[in-house]
Image (cartoon, rainbow, N blue to C red):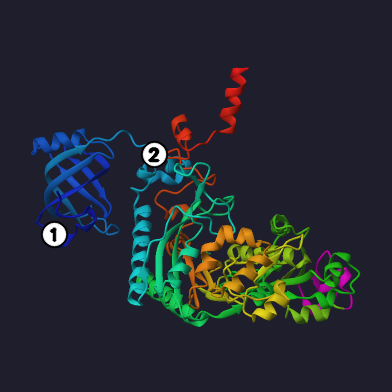
Amino acid sequence: MRSHYCGQLNETLVDQTVTVCGWVHRRRDHGGVIFLDMRDRDGIAQFVVDPDTAEAFANADRSRNEYVLRITGSVRLRPEGTQNPDMPTGMIEVLSQEVEILNAAATPPFQLDDHGKVGEEVRLKHRYMDLRRPDMIDRLRLRSRISHSVRAFLEQQGFLDIETPVLTRATPEGARDYLVPSRTHPGEFFALPQSPQLFKQLLMVSGLDRYYQIAKCFRDEDLRADRQPEFTQIDIEASFIEESDIMGITESMIRQLFDEVLNVSLPEFPRMTWHDAMRRFGSDKPDLRIPLELVDVDDLMKDVNFKVFSGPANADDGRVAALKVPGGASLSRKAIDEYTDFVGIYGAKGLAWIKVNERAKGIEGLQSPIVKFMDGIIDDLLDRLDARDGDIIFFGADKAETVNEAIGALRVRLGADLELYNQDWAPLWVVDFPMFETDDKGRLSPLHHPFTAPACTPDEFRHDPANALSRAYDMVLNGTELGGGSIRIHDWQMQSTVLEILGIGEAEAREKFGFLLDALQYGAPPHGGLAFGLDRLVMLMTGANTIREVIAFPKTQSAACLMTDAPGEVTAEQLKDLNIRLRQKAKKAEDSSE
Ligand code: ASP
Protein backbone atom coordinates (compact mmCIF):
# COMPACT_ATOMS: atom_id res chain seq x y z
CA MET A 1 0.00 0.00 0.00
CA ARG A 2 2.88 2.38 0.56
CA SER A 3 6.32 3.19 -0.79
CA HIS A 4 7.82 4.87 2.29
CA TYR A 5 7.29 5.46 5.97
CA CYS A 6 6.58 9.13 6.74
CA GLY A 7 9.74 9.40 8.82
CA GLN A 8 11.89 8.22 5.89
CA LEU A 9 11.03 11.14 3.60
CA ASN A 10 13.89 13.59 3.05
CA GLU A 11 15.74 15.75 0.50
CA THR A 12 17.13 12.74 -1.36
CA LEU A 13 13.60 12.01 -2.61
CA VAL A 14 12.89 15.44 -4.14
CA ASP A 15 10.82 15.13 -7.36
CA GLN A 16 9.96 11.51 -6.65
CA THR A 17 6.43 10.23 -6.24
CA VAL A 18 5.84 8.57 -2.89
CA THR A 19 2.88 6.89 -1.18
CA VAL A 20 2.54 6.85 2.60
CA CYS A 21 -0.08 5.46 4.95
CA GLY A 22 -0.59 6.87 8.40
CA TRP A 23 -2.54 9.00 10.86
CA VAL A 24 -3.39 12.67 10.67
CA HIS A 25 -1.27 14.17 13.41
CA ARG A 26 -2.42 17.72 12.74
CA ARG A 27 -4.48 19.41 10.05
CA ARG A 28 -4.17 23.10 9.24
CA ASP A 29 -6.43 24.94 6.84
CA HIS A 30 -4.55 27.90 5.40
CA GLY A 31 -7.45 29.38 3.47
CA GLY A 32 -7.40 27.46 0.25
CA VAL A 33 -4.48 25.13 1.03
CA ILE A 34 -4.63 22.30 3.57
CA PHE A 35 -1.55 21.14 5.43
CA LEU A 36 -1.60 17.63 6.88
CA ASP A 37 1.09 16.42 9.27
CA MET A 38 1.03 12.68 8.69
CA ARG A 39 2.41 10.32 11.32
CA ASP A 40 3.44 6.68 11.34
CA ARG A 41 5.78 4.68 13.53
CA ASP A 42 8.82 6.20 11.85
CA GLY A 43 8.00 9.88 12.24
CA ILE A 44 6.00 12.81 10.95
CA ALA A 45 6.04 14.54 7.54
CA GLN A 46 4.16 17.45 6.05
CA PHE A 47 1.71 17.05 3.16
CA VAL A 48 0.22 19.92 1.18
CA VAL A 49 -3.13 19.54 -0.57
CA ASP A 50 -4.42 22.31 -2.80
CA PRO A 51 -7.81 22.78 -4.36
CA ASP A 52 -6.60 21.94 -7.90
CA THR A 53 -6.78 18.29 -6.96
CA ALA A 54 -10.46 18.42 -6.14
CA GLU A 55 -11.04 14.90 -4.82
CA ALA A 56 -7.85 14.90 -2.75
CA PHE A 57 -8.77 18.31 -1.41
CA ALA A 58 -12.29 17.22 -0.45
CA ASN A 59 -10.91 14.23 1.45
CA ALA A 60 -8.25 16.30 3.18
CA ASP A 61 -10.98 18.76 4.11
CA ARG A 62 -13.09 16.00 5.70
CA SER A 63 -10.16 14.53 7.57
CA ARG A 64 -9.70 15.15 11.27
CA ASN A 65 -6.98 14.25 13.78
CA GLU A 66 -6.19 10.54 13.83
CA TYR A 67 -8.01 9.74 10.58
CA VAL A 68 -6.15 7.01 8.71
CA LEU A 69 -5.09 8.16 5.24
CA ARG A 70 -3.17 6.94 2.24
CA ILE A 71 -1.55 9.78 0.35
CA THR A 72 0.36 9.83 -2.92
CA GLY A 73 2.26 12.89 -4.01
CA SER A 74 5.60 14.28 -5.07
CA VAL A 75 8.35 15.37 -2.73
CA ARG A 76 9.59 18.93 -2.98
CA LEU A 77 11.81 21.23 -0.92
CA ARG A 78 9.88 23.43 1.45
CA PRO A 79 9.90 27.09 0.50
CA GLU A 80 12.65 29.19 2.03
CA GLY A 81 11.73 30.29 5.56
CA THR A 82 9.32 27.40 6.22
CA GLN A 83 12.01 24.75 6.64
CA ASN A 84 12.41 23.08 10.03
CA PRO A 85 15.93 21.74 10.53
CA ASP A 86 14.94 20.23 13.91
CA MET A 87 12.69 17.69 12.19
CA PRO A 88 14.27 14.83 10.21
CA THR A 89 11.70 15.49 7.46
CA GLY A 90 11.75 19.25 8.03
CA MET A 91 13.41 20.25 4.75
CA ILE A 92 10.72 18.77 2.52
CA GLU A 93 6.99 18.50 2.03
CA VAL A 94 4.84 16.38 -0.25
CA LEU A 95 2.53 17.96 -2.77
CA SER A 96 -0.36 15.52 -2.64
CA GLN A 97 -2.18 14.24 -5.70
CA GLU A 98 -4.32 11.54 -4.10
CA VAL A 99 -5.73 11.46 -0.60
CA GLU A 100 -7.69 8.37 0.31
CA ILE A 101 -9.48 8.06 3.64
CA LEU A 102 -8.83 4.51 4.86
CA ASN A 103 -10.70 5.06 8.09
CA ALA A 104 -12.29 7.80 10.11
CA ALA A 105 -11.51 8.34 13.80
CA ALA A 106 -13.57 9.57 16.70
CA THR A 107 -12.21 12.56 18.62
CA PRO A 108 -9.16 11.25 20.53
CA PRO A 109 -9.52 10.93 24.33
CA PHE A 110 -6.44 13.12 24.70
CA GLN A 111 -4.18 15.12 22.45
CA LEU A 112 -1.17 12.95 21.74
CA ASP A 113 1.12 15.98 22.08
CA ASP A 114 -0.39 16.81 25.42
CA HIS A 115 -0.03 13.46 27.17
CA GLY A 116 2.03 15.08 29.94
CA LYS A 117 -1.09 16.80 31.16
CA VAL A 118 -3.36 13.75 31.12
CA GLY A 119 -3.33 11.29 33.99
CA GLU A 120 -1.73 7.89 33.56
CA GLU A 121 -5.13 6.24 34.03
CA VAL A 122 -6.47 7.83 30.86
CA ARG A 123 -3.33 6.83 29.00
CA LEU A 124 -3.62 3.23 30.21
CA LYS A 125 -7.32 3.03 29.42
CA HIS A 126 -6.63 4.08 25.83
CA ARG A 127 -3.21 2.50 25.65
CA TYR A 128 -3.50 1.88 21.88
CA MET A 129 -3.66 5.68 21.48
CA ASP A 130 -0.88 6.31 23.98
CA LEU A 131 1.36 3.91 22.05
CA ARG A 132 0.98 6.09 18.94
CA ARG A 133 3.22 8.66 20.61
CA PRO A 134 6.77 8.78 19.23
CA ASP A 135 8.48 8.41 22.63
CA MET A 136 6.44 5.28 23.43
CA ILE A 137 7.24 3.86 20.00
CA ASP A 138 10.94 4.68 20.45
CA ARG A 139 11.06 2.82 23.76
CA LEU A 140 9.34 -0.26 22.32
CA ARG A 141 11.70 -0.16 19.36
CA LEU A 142 14.68 -0.04 21.70
CA ARG A 143 13.19 -2.90 23.69
CA SER A 144 13.01 -4.95 20.52
CA ARG A 145 16.63 -4.15 19.68
CA ILE A 146 17.68 -5.14 23.19
CA SER A 147 16.02 -8.56 23.00
CA HIS A 148 17.42 -9.05 19.52
CA SER A 149 20.96 -8.25 20.68
CA VAL A 150 20.64 -10.59 23.66
CA ARG A 151 19.26 -13.42 21.53
CA ALA A 152 21.97 -12.99 18.90
CA PHE A 153 24.71 -13.04 21.56
CA LEU A 154 23.37 -16.10 23.35
CA GLU A 155 22.71 -18.05 20.13
CA GLN A 156 26.25 -17.30 19.07
CA GLN A 157 27.51 -18.66 22.39
CA GLY A 158 25.64 -21.92 21.82
CA PHE A 159 22.62 -21.31 24.04
CA LEU A 160 19.34 -22.89 22.87
CA ASP A 161 16.05 -21.01 23.10
CA ILE A 162 13.70 -23.48 24.78
CA GLU A 163 10.17 -22.76 25.97
CA THR A 164 8.99 -23.98 29.35
CA PRO A 165 5.37 -24.38 30.50
CA VAL A 166 3.20 -21.57 31.73
CA LEU A 167 0.68 -23.91 33.33
CA THR A 168 2.78 -25.61 35.94
CA ARG A 169 3.41 -26.18 39.65
CA ALA A 170 4.56 -23.54 42.09
CA THR A 171 8.20 -22.41 41.80
CA PRO A 172 9.24 -20.71 45.02
CA GLU A 173 10.84 -17.32 44.33
CA GLY A 174 9.42 -15.73 47.45
CA ALA A 175 6.12 -14.38 46.07
CA ARG A 176 2.52 -15.54 46.03
CA ASP A 177 1.46 -17.69 43.07
CA TYR A 178 -1.12 -16.86 40.45
CA LEU A 179 -3.35 -19.93 40.36
CA VAL A 180 -5.37 -21.35 37.46
CA PRO A 181 -8.14 -23.82 38.28
CA SER A 182 -8.13 -27.09 36.37
CA ARG A 183 -11.43 -28.15 34.76
CA THR A 184 -10.28 -31.68 34.11
CA HIS A 185 -8.99 -32.18 37.65
CA PRO A 186 -11.72 -30.68 39.80
CA GLY A 187 -10.44 -28.90 42.88
CA GLU A 188 -6.86 -28.80 41.57
CA PHE A 189 -4.90 -25.80 40.37
CA PHE A 190 -1.99 -24.94 38.15
CA ALA A 191 0.38 -22.20 39.28
CA LEU A 192 1.78 -19.72 36.76
CA PRO A 193 5.57 -19.81 36.98
CA GLN A 194 7.28 -17.27 39.22
CA SER A 195 10.27 -18.15 37.06
CA PRO A 196 11.28 -21.11 34.86
CA GLN A 197 13.80 -22.09 37.55
CA LEU A 198 13.05 -25.78 37.95
CA PHE A 199 12.46 -26.44 34.26
CA LYS A 200 15.75 -24.88 33.29
CA GLN A 201 17.52 -27.03 35.86
CA LEU A 202 15.75 -30.10 34.46
CA LEU A 203 16.94 -29.14 30.97
CA MET A 204 20.47 -29.30 32.34
CA VAL A 205 19.76 -32.77 33.75
CA SER A 206 18.63 -33.66 30.22
CA GLY A 207 21.99 -32.60 28.83
CA LEU A 208 20.79 -29.58 26.82
CA ASP A 209 23.88 -27.88 28.29
CA ARG A 210 23.08 -24.23 27.49
CA TYR A 211 19.55 -22.81 27.66
CA TYR A 212 18.00 -19.38 27.41
CA GLN A 213 14.50 -18.02 27.15
CA ILE A 214 12.91 -14.62 27.16
CA ALA A 215 10.25 -15.77 29.54
CA LYS A 216 7.15 -14.32 31.14
CA CYS A 217 7.10 -14.72 34.92
CA PHE A 218 4.17 -14.15 37.25
CA ARG A 219 4.31 -13.03 40.87
CA ASP A 220 1.31 -12.00 42.90
CA GLU A 221 3.08 -9.44 45.06
CA ASP A 222 2.00 -6.26 46.74
CA LEU A 223 2.90 -3.81 44.05
CA ARG A 224 4.12 -1.00 46.26
CA ALA A 225 7.40 -0.71 44.39
CA ASP A 226 7.66 -0.27 40.65
CA ARG A 227 6.72 -3.87 39.84
CA GLN A 228 4.38 -5.70 37.52
CA PRO A 229 2.46 -8.92 38.25
CA GLU A 230 3.69 -10.33 34.94
CA PHE A 231 7.15 -9.38 33.82
CA THR A 232 9.84 -10.64 31.50
CA GLN A 233 13.12 -12.31 32.32
CA ILE A 234 16.10 -13.12 30.15
CA ASP A 235 16.52 -16.55 31.71
CA ILE A 236 19.81 -18.42 31.33
CA GLU A 237 21.25 -21.74 32.53
CA ALA A 238 24.40 -23.70 31.67
CA SER A 239 26.07 -26.94 32.70
CA PHE A 240 29.63 -27.77 33.75
CA ILE A 241 30.33 -24.20 34.76
CA GLU A 242 31.45 -22.29 37.79
CA GLU A 243 30.60 -18.79 38.96
CA SER A 244 33.35 -17.13 36.94
CA ASP A 245 32.19 -18.81 33.70
CA ILE A 246 28.60 -17.68 33.83
CA MET A 247 29.48 -14.27 35.22
CA GLY A 248 31.98 -13.85 32.39
CA ILE A 249 29.49 -14.83 29.68
CA THR A 250 26.69 -12.62 30.96
CA GLU A 251 28.98 -9.69 31.61
CA SER A 252 30.11 -9.90 27.96
CA MET A 253 26.46 -10.09 26.92
CA ILE A 254 25.57 -6.88 28.79
CA ARG A 255 28.73 -5.16 27.62
CA GLN A 256 27.98 -6.00 23.98
CA LEU A 257 24.36 -4.94 24.43
CA PHE A 258 25.28 -1.49 25.72
CA ASP A 259 27.84 -1.09 22.99
CA GLU A 260 25.45 -2.12 20.19
CA VAL A 261 22.33 -0.35 21.34
CA LEU A 262 23.58 2.73 23.19
CA ASN A 263 27.13 3.02 21.90
CA VAL A 264 28.27 2.95 25.52
CA SER A 265 31.38 1.14 26.60
CA LEU A 266 30.72 -0.01 30.16
CA PRO A 267 33.59 0.22 32.66
CA GLU A 268 34.99 -2.79 34.54
CA PHE A 269 32.52 -4.71 36.70
CA PRO A 270 34.12 -4.80 40.14
CA ARG A 271 33.16 -7.63 42.52
CA MET A 272 32.01 -6.79 45.99
CA THR A 273 30.96 -9.15 48.73
CA TRP A 274 27.44 -8.81 50.07
CA HIS A 275 28.91 -8.05 53.47
CA ASP A 276 31.03 -5.16 52.15
CA ALA A 277 28.12 -3.79 50.13
CA MET A 278 25.93 -3.68 53.23
CA ARG A 279 28.66 -2.16 55.36
CA ARG A 280 29.83 0.49 52.91
CA PHE A 281 26.54 1.35 51.21
CA GLY A 282 23.79 -0.12 53.38
CA SER A 283 22.47 -1.96 50.34
CA ASP A 284 22.97 -5.19 48.41
CA LYS A 285 22.54 -3.18 45.20
CA PRO A 286 24.76 -0.18 45.76
CA ASP A 287 24.67 2.74 43.37
CA LEU A 288 28.39 3.28 42.81
CA ARG A 289 27.84 6.50 40.87
CA ILE A 290 27.45 8.23 44.22
CA PRO A 291 30.77 8.90 45.97
CA LEU A 292 29.40 8.63 49.54
CA GLU A 293 30.03 5.77 51.98
CA LEU A 294 28.73 4.69 55.35
CA VAL A 295 31.50 4.64 57.93
CA ASP A 296 31.29 2.55 61.10
CA VAL A 297 31.75 4.55 64.29
CA ASP A 298 30.41 2.05 66.84
CA ASP A 299 33.74 1.82 68.65
CA LEU A 300 33.83 5.60 69.20
CA MET A 301 30.24 5.76 70.43
CA LYS A 302 30.35 2.98 73.01
CA ASP A 303 30.96 5.30 75.95
CA VAL A 304 29.33 8.55 74.87
CA ASN A 305 26.75 9.98 77.23
CA PHE A 306 24.03 9.69 74.61
CA LYS A 307 21.88 6.55 74.80
CA VAL A 308 20.65 6.89 71.24
CA PHE A 309 24.22 6.17 70.11
CA SER A 310 25.74 4.18 72.95
CA GLY A 311 22.80 1.72 73.00
CA PRO A 312 23.19 0.44 69.42
CA ALA A 313 27.00 0.79 69.66
CA ASN A 314 27.02 -1.77 72.46
CA ALA A 315 24.27 -4.07 71.11
CA ASP A 316 25.14 -7.22 69.16
CA ASP A 317 22.67 -6.45 66.43
CA GLY A 318 23.21 -2.66 66.53
CA ARG A 319 25.11 -0.30 64.31
CA VAL A 320 26.16 3.34 64.44
CA ALA A 321 27.19 4.60 61.03
CA ALA A 322 28.15 8.03 59.76
CA LEU A 323 27.63 9.43 56.27
CA LYS A 324 29.68 12.45 55.33
CA VAL A 325 28.39 14.71 52.57
CA PRO A 326 31.11 17.05 51.30
CA GLY A 327 29.78 20.57 50.97
CA GLY A 328 26.53 19.57 52.72
CA ALA A 329 26.83 22.16 55.51
CA SER A 330 24.85 24.50 53.29
CA LEU A 331 21.75 22.28 53.58
CA SER A 332 18.92 24.25 55.14
CA ARG A 333 17.12 23.28 58.32
CA LYS A 334 14.06 22.57 56.20
CA ALA A 335 16.03 20.19 53.95
CA ILE A 336 17.41 18.37 56.99
CA ASP A 337 13.88 18.06 58.42
CA GLU A 338 12.75 16.56 55.12
CA TYR A 339 15.58 14.03 55.22
CA THR A 340 14.62 13.21 58.81
CA ASP A 341 11.08 12.41 57.65
CA PHE A 342 12.52 10.44 54.76
CA VAL A 343 14.65 8.13 56.93
CA GLY A 344 11.56 7.70 59.13
CA ILE A 345 9.93 5.80 56.27
CA TYR A 346 12.66 3.19 56.74
CA GLY A 347 12.12 2.96 60.48
CA ALA A 348 14.82 5.37 61.69
CA LYS A 349 13.66 7.20 64.79
CA GLY A 350 15.59 10.37 63.96
CA LEU A 351 18.50 11.76 61.98
CA ALA A 352 21.42 13.20 63.93
CA TRP A 353 23.83 15.52 62.14
CA ILE A 354 26.92 17.66 62.57
CA LYS A 355 27.77 20.58 60.31
CA VAL A 356 31.49 21.28 60.08
CA ASN A 357 31.61 25.05 59.66
CA GLU A 358 35.18 25.74 60.70
CA ARG A 359 37.13 22.80 61.94
CA ALA A 360 40.10 24.84 63.13
CA LYS A 361 37.87 26.38 65.81
CA GLY A 362 37.27 23.00 67.49
CA ILE A 363 33.81 22.40 68.99
CA GLU A 364 32.97 26.08 68.40
CA GLY A 365 33.30 25.57 64.69
CA LEU A 366 30.73 22.76 64.67
CA GLN A 367 26.99 23.14 64.54
CA SER A 368 24.88 20.27 65.77
CA PRO A 369 22.23 19.29 68.30
CA ILE A 370 24.36 16.34 69.45
CA VAL A 371 27.89 17.68 69.51
CA LYS A 372 27.66 18.31 73.28
CA PHE A 373 27.65 14.53 73.79
CA MET A 374 30.74 13.97 71.68
CA ASP A 375 33.26 15.40 74.10
CA GLY A 376 36.50 13.47 73.97
CA ILE A 377 35.82 11.64 70.71
CA ILE A 378 35.04 14.46 68.33
CA ASP A 379 38.56 14.73 66.91
CA ASP A 380 38.80 11.00 66.31
CA LEU A 381 35.39 11.09 64.68
CA LEU A 382 36.23 13.98 62.36
CA ASP A 383 39.60 12.42 61.53
CA ARG A 384 38.03 9.08 60.69
CA LEU A 385 35.61 10.79 58.34
CA ASP A 386 38.28 13.13 57.00
CA ALA A 387 35.76 15.92 57.63
CA ARG A 388 36.53 19.33 56.14
CA ASP A 389 34.99 22.76 56.43
CA GLY A 390 31.63 22.85 54.68
CA ASP A 391 30.78 19.16 55.21
CA ILE A 392 27.76 17.73 56.95
CA ILE A 393 27.82 14.37 58.70
CA PHE A 394 24.62 12.36 59.16
CA PHE A 395 24.30 9.50 61.63
CA GLY A 396 22.21 6.37 61.81
CA ALA A 397 22.05 4.50 65.13
CA ASP A 398 19.70 1.55 65.54
CA LYS A 399 19.51 -2.14 64.68
CA ALA A 400 22.04 -2.70 61.90
CA GLU A 401 19.23 -3.60 59.51
CA THR A 402 17.41 -0.32 60.12
CA VAL A 403 20.59 1.76 59.84
CA ASN A 404 21.50 0.07 56.58
CA GLU A 405 18.07 0.61 55.08
CA ALA A 406 17.62 4.17 56.29
CA ILE A 407 21.10 5.57 55.74
CA GLY A 408 21.51 3.49 52.56
CA ALA A 409 18.34 5.10 51.19
CA LEU A 410 19.44 8.55 52.38
CA ARG A 411 22.70 8.09 50.49
CA VAL A 412 20.80 7.36 47.27
CA ARG A 413 18.40 10.27 47.86
CA LEU A 414 21.27 12.71 48.51
CA GLY A 415 23.02 11.46 45.39
CA ALA A 416 19.98 12.38 43.31
CA ASP A 417 19.06 15.62 45.12
CA LEU A 418 22.57 17.05 45.14
CA GLU A 419 23.48 15.58 41.72
CA LEU A 420 26.54 13.85 43.10
CA TYR A 421 26.86 11.25 40.32
CA ASN A 422 30.47 10.99 39.17
CA GLN A 423 29.86 8.60 36.26
CA ASP A 424 27.00 7.63 33.93
CA TRP A 425 27.13 3.87 34.36
CA ALA A 426 28.42 2.01 37.40
CA PRO A 427 28.02 -1.78 37.10
CA LEU A 428 29.22 -4.33 39.63
CA TRP A 429 28.80 -7.90 40.78
CA VAL A 430 27.67 -8.57 44.32
CA VAL A 431 28.86 -11.99 45.53
CA ASP A 432 29.12 -14.12 48.68
CA PHE A 433 25.52 -13.67 49.77
CA PRO A 434 24.38 -15.45 52.90
CA MET A 435 22.34 -18.60 52.13
CA PHE A 436 19.49 -17.58 54.43
CA GLU A 437 17.92 -14.75 56.32
CA THR A 438 16.56 -15.32 59.79
CA ASP A 439 13.17 -13.94 60.79
CA ASP A 440 12.07 -12.75 64.27
CA LYS A 441 11.10 -16.28 65.21
CA GLY A 442 14.47 -17.67 64.21
CA ARG A 443 13.11 -19.32 61.06
CA LEU A 444 15.37 -19.42 58.02
CA SER A 445 14.29 -18.44 54.54
CA PRO A 446 16.44 -18.47 51.40
CA LEU A 447 17.95 -15.16 50.31
CA HIS A 448 17.73 -16.28 46.68
CA HIS A 449 15.77 -19.52 46.26
CA PRO A 450 16.13 -22.96 47.81
CA PHE A 451 18.03 -24.42 44.83
CA THR A 452 21.10 -22.23 45.36
CA ALA A 453 24.24 -24.13 46.34
CA PRO A 454 26.06 -23.32 49.58
CA ALA A 455 29.65 -22.14 49.27
CA CYS A 456 30.94 -24.56 51.94
CA THR A 457 31.27 -28.32 52.27
CA PRO A 458 28.14 -30.36 53.10
CA ASP A 459 29.51 -31.02 56.60
CA GLU A 460 30.21 -27.36 57.32
CA PHE A 461 26.80 -26.50 55.95
CA ARG A 462 24.95 -28.97 58.13
CA HIS A 463 26.90 -27.83 61.14
CA ASP A 464 26.01 -24.12 60.83
CA PRO A 465 23.49 -23.46 58.07
CA ALA A 466 22.41 -20.06 59.42
CA ASN A 467 25.87 -18.63 58.75
CA ALA A 468 26.58 -20.35 55.45
CA LEU A 469 27.37 -18.30 52.39
CA SER A 470 25.87 -19.19 49.03
CA ARG A 471 27.25 -19.43 45.51
CA ALA A 472 24.89 -16.67 44.36
CA TYR A 473 25.74 -13.51 42.42
CA ASP A 474 23.80 -10.40 41.42
CA MET A 475 24.62 -7.98 38.64
CA VAL A 476 23.89 -4.43 39.72
CA LEU A 477 23.85 -1.30 37.59
CA ASN A 478 23.35 2.22 38.94
CA GLY A 479 21.70 0.92 42.09
CA THR A 480 19.34 -1.43 40.28
CA GLU A 481 19.58 -5.21 40.41
CA LEU A 482 19.73 -6.14 36.74
CA GLY A 483 19.95 -9.84 37.29
CA GLY A 484 20.78 -12.52 39.76
CA GLY A 485 21.50 -16.20 39.87
CA SER A 486 23.61 -18.91 41.37
CA ILE A 487 25.40 -22.19 41.02
CA ARG A 488 22.71 -24.75 41.88
CA ILE A 489 22.63 -27.74 44.14
CA HIS A 490 23.08 -30.79 41.91
CA ASP A 491 23.28 -33.36 44.68
CA TRP A 492 19.89 -34.67 45.80
CA GLN A 493 20.99 -35.21 49.37
CA MET A 494 22.16 -31.63 49.70
CA GLN A 495 18.90 -30.47 48.12
CA SER A 496 16.93 -32.51 50.64
CA THR A 497 19.02 -31.07 53.48
CA VAL A 498 18.33 -27.49 52.36
CA LEU A 499 14.60 -28.16 52.13
CA GLU A 500 14.70 -29.75 55.55
CA ILE A 501 16.54 -26.74 57.05
CA LEU A 502 13.86 -24.52 55.56
CA GLY A 503 11.30 -26.50 57.54
CA ILE A 504 9.94 -28.37 54.54
CA GLY A 505 9.38 -31.91 55.82
CA GLU A 506 10.08 -35.01 53.76
CA ALA A 507 6.48 -35.58 52.76
CA GLU A 508 5.98 -31.96 51.72
CA ALA A 509 9.31 -31.95 49.87
CA ARG A 510 8.23 -35.05 47.93
CA GLU A 511 4.82 -33.59 47.22
CA LYS A 512 6.18 -30.26 45.95
CA PHE A 513 9.58 -31.08 44.51
CA GLY A 514 9.59 -34.86 44.15
CA PHE A 515 10.23 -34.54 40.41
CA LEU A 516 13.34 -32.42 41.05
CA LEU A 517 14.68 -34.68 43.79
CA ASP A 518 14.16 -37.68 41.49
CA ALA A 519 15.85 -35.94 38.55
CA LEU A 520 18.86 -35.05 40.69
CA GLN A 521 19.38 -38.80 41.22
CA TYR A 522 19.62 -39.60 37.52
CA GLY A 523 22.94 -37.93 36.74
CA ALA A 524 22.53 -34.21 37.25
CA PRO A 525 25.54 -32.22 36.01
CA PRO A 526 26.98 -29.32 38.00
CA HIS A 527 25.08 -26.32 36.67
CA GLY A 528 24.09 -22.75 37.32
CA GLY A 529 22.65 -19.69 35.67
CA LEU A 530 20.90 -16.45 36.22
CA ALA A 531 18.04 -14.29 35.07
CA PHE A 532 17.93 -10.64 34.07
CA GLY A 533 14.82 -8.53 34.46
CA LEU A 534 14.23 -7.36 30.90
CA ASP A 535 11.75 -4.62 31.81
CA ARG A 536 14.11 -3.04 34.29
CA LEU A 537 17.03 -3.32 31.86
CA VAL A 538 15.02 -1.54 29.16
CA MET A 539 13.94 1.08 31.69
CA LEU A 540 17.53 1.84 32.59
CA MET A 541 18.67 1.89 28.97
CA THR A 542 15.85 4.18 27.82
CA GLY A 543 15.98 6.42 30.89
CA ALA A 544 12.25 5.83 31.49
CA ASN A 545 10.85 6.73 34.90
CA THR A 546 8.70 3.69 35.52
CA ILE A 547 8.62 0.14 34.30
CA ARG A 548 5.14 0.82 32.84
CA GLU A 549 6.72 3.13 30.27
CA VAL A 550 8.61 0.26 28.66
CA ILE A 551 5.80 -2.33 28.63
CA ALA A 552 3.24 -2.13 25.83
CA PHE A 553 0.25 -3.12 27.95
CA PRO A 554 1.16 -2.83 31.62
CA LYS A 555 -1.03 -3.29 34.64
CA THR A 556 -1.72 -0.72 37.32
CA GLN A 557 -0.34 -0.72 40.86
CA SER A 558 -3.39 -2.74 41.89
CA ALA A 559 -2.61 -5.40 39.25
CA ALA A 560 -5.47 -4.56 36.88
CA CYS A 561 -5.61 -3.74 33.18
CA LEU A 562 -7.62 -0.55 32.74
CA MET A 563 -8.03 -1.13 29.01
CA THR A 564 -9.49 -4.65 28.99
CA ASP A 565 -10.86 -4.36 32.50
CA ALA A 566 -9.07 -7.55 33.53
CA PRO A 567 -9.42 -9.28 35.89
CA GLY A 568 -13.14 -9.66 35.25
CA GLU A 569 -16.04 -11.73 36.47
CA VAL A 570 -16.87 -15.03 34.79
CA THR A 571 -20.20 -16.70 34.15
CA ALA A 572 -21.89 -19.13 36.49
CA GLU A 573 -21.39 -21.87 33.85
CA GLN A 574 -17.65 -21.29 33.73
CA LEU A 575 -17.45 -21.52 37.50
CA LYS A 576 -19.52 -24.67 37.50
CA ASP A 577 -17.25 -26.25 34.90
CA LEU A 578 -14.34 -25.46 37.16
CA ASN A 579 -16.08 -26.78 40.24
CA ILE A 580 -15.78 -23.44 41.95
CA ARG A 581 -18.33 -21.69 44.09
CA LEU A 582 -17.59 -18.10 45.11
CA ARG A 583 -17.97 -17.33 48.78
CA GLN A 584 -19.60 -13.98 48.27
CA LYS A 585 -21.99 -15.24 45.59
CA ALA A 586 -22.85 -18.20 47.78
CA LYS A 587 -23.66 -15.85 50.60
CA LYS A 588 -25.91 -13.73 48.41
CA ALA A 589 -27.73 -16.84 47.26
CA GLU A 590 -28.18 -17.97 50.86
CA ASP A 591 -29.52 -14.56 51.87
CA SER A 592 -32.09 -14.54 49.10
CA SER A 593 -33.32 -18.06 49.89
CA GLU A 594 -34.03 -17.14 53.50
N1 ASP B 1 15.12 -17.97 39.04
C1 ASP B 1 15.87 -16.86 39.60
C2 ASP B 1 14.98 -15.63 39.71
O1 ASP B 1 13.92 -15.57 39.12
C3 ASP B 1 17.06 -16.51 38.79
C4 ASP B 1 18.05 -17.62 38.77
O2 ASP B 1 18.47 -18.07 39.84
O3 ASP B 1 18.47 -18.00 37.66
O4 ASP B 1 15.33 -14.68 40.39
Q: Which residues are magenta?
A: 357-376
Give the mark nearer the N terminus: 2 vs 1.
1
> Magenta stretch containing residue 269, yes or no?
no
Residue projecting furthest to the top: 594
What amino acid does circle 1 point to?
Answer: Leu
The residue that label 2 is drawn on is: 110
Residue occupying the point 66% across, 66% down: 500
Q: Which image quarter is the C terminus in?
A: top right
Q: In the rendering, at what x and y percent does residue 63 appear?
A: 22, 36
Residue occupying the point 64% across, 81% down: 456
What amino acid does circle 2 point to?
Answer: Phe
State the CA–CA distance, disc 2 to disc 1: 34 Å
Q: Secondary structure at mark 2?
A: loop
Which mark is nearer the camera, 2 or 1? 2
Residue 24 is labelled as none
Q: In the rendering, at what x and y percent does residue 185 appear?
A: 48, 44
Q: Nearer the viewer, residue 410 or 540?
A: 540
Tell me if 18 is positioned left or right of 552 in this view: left
| Location of residue 110 (image quadrant) | top left
Local crowd size for mark 2, using a 10 Å CA cut-off: few (<14), some (14–19), many (≥20): some
The residue that label 1 is drawn on is: 13
Tell me if 402 is positioned left or right of 525 in this view: right
Q: Nearer the viewer, residue 306 or 553?
A: 553
- Residue 270 appears in the picture as rendered: yes
